[in-house]
Amino acid sequence: MKTDLQTRHGGKILADALAAQGVKIAFGVPGESYLPVLDGLYDLRDRLRFIVCRQEGGASYMAEAQGKLTGEPGVLFVTRGPGASNGAIGVHTGFQDSTPMVVFIGQVPNEFAEREAFQEIDYRRMYGQMAKWVAQIDRVERIPEYVSRAFHTAVAGRPGPVVLALPEDALYAEAAVADLARHHVVRPAPSPSALHELQSLLEKAQRPFVLLGGGGWDRPTCERLQRWIEANGLPAGTSFRCQDLFDNRSECYAGDVGIGINPELAQRVKDADVLLVVGARLGEMTSGGYTLVEAPQPKQALVHVHAGAEELGRVYRPALAINSGMAQFVEALETLAFDKPAWRAESRALHENYLAWSKPRPIPGELQYGEIVQWLAQRLPEDAIVAGGAGNFAGWLHRHFRYKGFRTQLGSTNGSMGYGFPAALAAKLVHPDRTVLGLCGDGDFLMTGQEFATAVPYDAPFVTLVVNNGLYGTIRMHQEREYPGRVYGTGLKNPDFAAYARAFGGHGETVSRTAEFAPAFERALASGKPALIELRIDPDAITPATTLSAIRDRALRSKQ
Ligand SMILES: Cc1ncc(C[n+]2csc(CCOP(=O)(O)OP(=O)(O)O)c2C)c(N)n1
Ligand SMILES: [Mg+2]
């Protein structure tokens, strides 16, 4: 950290400010708009890796995944208008996922401002709804101040993205200014009276349910909470795409409360007398479209614990609102103990129900995708990271995989396609020692598949599965349900995916039968390269539980 007040150009001040914040990796696509930053990063190249990507969508997903994995802000650099436009997808993901991020965008020099100069956009308006704070650093000497505030803001309360625009003149200008030390992370803790109220609510509860979700967690906190839940015999579930907050093998785990929820679990959430929601916002996907937990007045006694004070009472009127960080809440919770044999018996029954529900059933065709997911859950090391994108193919992962610990799952709760591949790549770059698996659909993969050209040169060996049904399957499913037989705009003609991987210098395999998968997976892993396995699945196998033809037939019958 520089305190001897040497004169530096803005790009160097910015790069040094990032190093002072503890940043070790950043993602981006270069632009002439921020050349001084690249020059500043050049000097730090041994301790701050700038990962150069092929499209800002991929880069922004990588920065988001890094933030999600580590809890430290993921850092992204994109150029003006075009780069900012491509990069928006990962920022939206970060916003809905409560992921800390700091995004830097090139901006026209101040002397040209407001003329709609080359690639000029007002980022405050563009990003206003998907960032916690958007600002522009107009003066070189204030760069450390803005960067420090950006990092504080990204991690505070409900974490999220911050966007800083960098006018070119402020980057080329020079100043003698001191760096600021690393940001603080400040978390509220529950008050004694809130804890007392929680104790009396739970003491009276016959059918409590704990739901974990959202951001701001860490591994020790998850493990401690799990031990407390197990010690007290409460049933617990996880919110949409937050299945790794609780070991799915625990006898208290009841399943995930998200898309394609186990109907018995859905009913149980509705029937809870006390619903203890820790960290989750209870969004549309987790609340079953606001039916499992009704807005604004839930039927259950809702205890809502959230690190962002503004999230409490925002959608639901809780019986008890607790503004707390996750670790601080768990620490307080550990002072409470309950002796309720009935809770434990019911938790076990719910877990048995989850085990039965999550067993793969046969699907049409020779590739039993559910069995493959089940095999992977056993084959992968406990700390392996599984990154999934959006589409029906992810439904098998949600239902049949067993997550075993914190941040073994990376997913986009905003349901944005193209996430799995770059998120897996970021995971491998951040944790080179861990096994990483990407799971993509055929539509999903090609939204960011060009990042194969990032994975190969950065030597990131991980395996990606591309589930090929020749369809934008999710949309086809909804189309057949709403307008049966009137198929339009939902078919795909695909390339040879294995050849695509090989063209980039990766390893490629194609699998059409269940038994071919395990040897192909072992070869892919052993290749030591970024690897892709195309899984050719019967297009009729549209979800783990039903077929496209059954959906169409049912819809046709109901319209007769
Ligand atoms: C960026 C983005 N664009 C469009 C959509 C709408 N969408 C949701 S799922 C889906 C189809 C996914 O197709 P694929 O990846 O092949 O998976 P499948 O459903 O066939 O398993 C689409 C187009 C979206 N969620 N995200
Ligand atoms: Mg598909």
Image: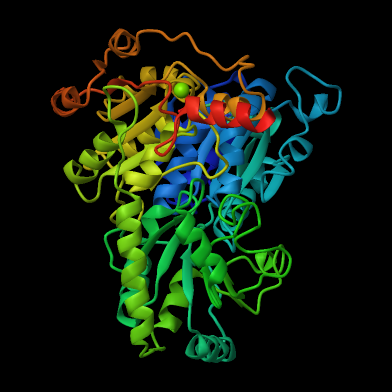
Q: How many marks?
A: 0
> Which percent across, then down, holds residue 185?
51, 64
Left or right? Give the position of 250 relative to 222.
left
Query: Residue 433, image x and y in percent?
Result: 21, 42
Which residue occupies the foreground of this view, 260 or 144?
260
Q: Residue furthest right?
A: 115
- Residue 387 lies left or right of residue 415; in this view the side is left
Q: Is residue 461 above or below residue 44?
A: above
Q: Foreground residue, 539 or 141?
A: 539
Instruction: Residue at 37%, 39% (x, y): give it.
Output: 396
The answer to whether residue 560 is visible is yes
Q: How is the image coloured?
A: rainbow
Q: Quadrant of residue 504?
A: top left
The percent position of residue 222, horizontal first and vertical second, equals: 37, 66
Q: Which residue shows up at 41% across the image and 88% down it? A: 336
Q: Position of residue 81 (x, y in %)?
A: 69, 23
* Quarter occupied by residue 156: bottom right
Considering every residue shown, the one lying at the far front of the view is 560
> In terms of depth relative to the viewer, which is nearer, 447 or 338?
338
Q: Quadrant of residue 50?
A: top left
Q: In the rendered view of the protein, which quadrant contains the C terminus?
A: top right
Task: Judge whether residue 185 can be spotted in this image.
Answer: no
> Is 306 situated above or below 536?
below
